[in-house]
Amino acid sequence: QFVMSCRVLGLDVEIAAVYATCLAIGARGHATVVASLVHTDANYPCRDLYARCGFDGDDGNWIKSTSAEHAALNHIVVSTDTVPAFAR
């Protein structure tokens, strides 16, 4: 689960966060990422996030191979240097 300010939605920060999460899951040896999204009034702006990130699925359940291509985000750098070891 992650929460993001609406001020950065649409700037591809949300896509970078999903991409980094997929890479971390793949680095742990998992072949797929499974995600879910429960629709609420508050998350309307991000309901298409998993589809935009290349996941297959429907309105509630999404899946993507960790070896699948990810969008090139040349304007965003994601660093895990400050992530605690237990979260990597």
Image: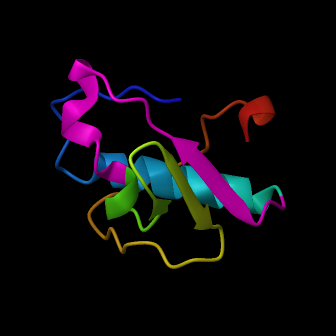
Kindly give the residue lying farthest to the right in the view shown: 29
Q: Nearer the viewer, residue 55 or 18?
A: 55
Left or right for 64, reference 16: right
Image location of residue 55, percent across then percent down: 47, 63
Rendered position, 49 above or below 30: above
Q: Residue at x 32, y 58 (%)?
A: 76
Instruction: Tell me the quadrant of the picture where the C terminus can be found.
Output: top right
Tell me which segment is drawn in magenta.
29-49
Image location of residue 16, percent across then percent down: 40, 54
Rendered position, 35 above or below 63: above
Q: Residue at x 71, y 53 (%)?
A: 25
Left or right for 11, reference 59: left
Image location of residue 47, percent across then percent down: 29, 42
- Mark count: 0
Image location of residue 82, percent across then percent down: 60, 35
Rendered position, 51 above or below 81: below
Colour scheme employed for the rendering of this structure:
rainbow
Q: Quadrant of residue 35?
A: top right
Q: Residue at x 65, y 68 (%)?
A: 66
Say if the magenta span includes residue 11. no
Q: Nearer the viewer, residue 40 or 53?
A: 40
Q: Quadrant of residue 6?
A: top left
Left or right for 58, reference 67: left
Q: Residue at x 16, y 48 (%)?
A: 10
Say if the magenta span includes residue 43. yes
